[in-house]
Amino acid sequence: MHTVITLGTLADNYTFVLESQGEAVVIDPGEASPVLRTLERLGSRLLAVLCTHAHFDHTGGNQELVRRTDCEVLLPDDSGADRMLGVGPFEFTVLGTPGHSADSVCFYLPEVDGQPGDVFTGDTMFCGGCGRLFTRSPEAMWASLCKLAALPPETRVFCGHDYTLENYEFAVTLEPENSALRARLAEARRLASDGSVTVPSTIAAECATNVFLRAADPNLRRVLGMESATDVEVFAEVRRRKDRF
C-alpha cells in the first residue's frame, strides 16, 4: 500500500510524492522546495526522482533534490519501449507514450491489496485533455492515448498539469448538449472555485468524457463532419481545434 501526495508547483504543474513504509519517490518535481517540506513532514527518505519527460517544468527541482537528499534521478529515454522499474517498495511499469515529446513515458502502479492502480501521465493525458504534439505526430500520440485507455477502468489518473477547466470548456464547444461533459465542466468549475486539485481522475471517467479519447464516437464524428475519417484523423482535428481555442 502507498500514499500519493499531490503538490502544486510552478504555475499549474502537479508534482507527486509517493510514500510507503518511510520511503518515497517523487514524480515530475518542477521545483524542489514543496517536495522537501513534504518529506520533512512525513519523515520519509527520498529514494528517487522519476520524470515523465525532460521538459524543465517537470525536472526543475532535480538537482536540488539530489543535493539535499542524495537520491537518484531516473530520466526517460526515447526508445518507446515498455519496461519494469523497481524502486524500493514501488514496482512501476514504465509505459512508452511518445507524442507530446519523443521521450514521454507514464508510470503505472497496478492494483494491489484492493488499492486501485495509479498511472502518472505527465503531459501525455490530462483530465479531459492531452498534451500538445511537439513531435508533430498525431499517430504516435493517438497510439499512446489508446495504451492508457486500455488500463483497468478503476485506475486513478494523476496528470502533470491542472488544465481541467479549460479542457472541458473546450469540449462543450464541440458538444454543447453532452450532459456528461457539462457535468465534468461544472465539477471543474467547483474545484477551481474552491482552490482544490482536480486529480485524480480515473481511466473510466477519461474514456467517457475526454474528447481526445473519443475519436470513434459517432456523435463527435458527426459534429466534426468526419463520419468516414480514421480515428487518427479525428483525433488530429480535435487537437488542431484545441490548439486554436
Image (cartoon, rainbow, N blue to C red):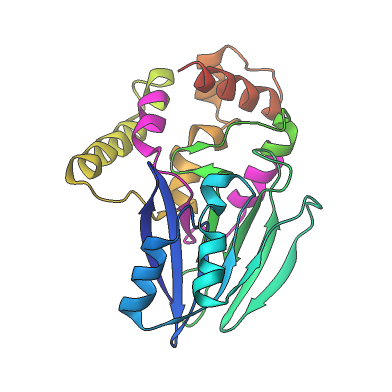
Q: Residue furthest bottom?
A: 21
- Point out the stretch of residues depicted in magenta: 142-170
Q: Is residue 159 magenta?
A: yes
Q: Quadrant of residue 109?
A: bottom right
Q: In the visual, does 29 lie left or right of 182?
A: right
Which residue shows up at 71% across the image and 42% down it?
Answer: 143
Vertical placement of 72 versus 223: above or below? below
Residue 201 falls left or right of residue 52: left
Q: State whether residue 190 appears in this view.
A: yes
Q: Residue at x 62, y 43 (%)?
A: 145
Is residue 109 visible to the viewer in this orientation of the structure? no
Q: Is residue 105 magenta?
A: no
Q: Residue furthest front?
A: 67
The quadrant the C terminus occupies is top left
In this rendering, the answer to whether 179 lies above or below 80 is: above
Residue drawn at 69 percent across, 72 percent down? 85
Q: Is residue 60 left or right of residue 102?
A: left
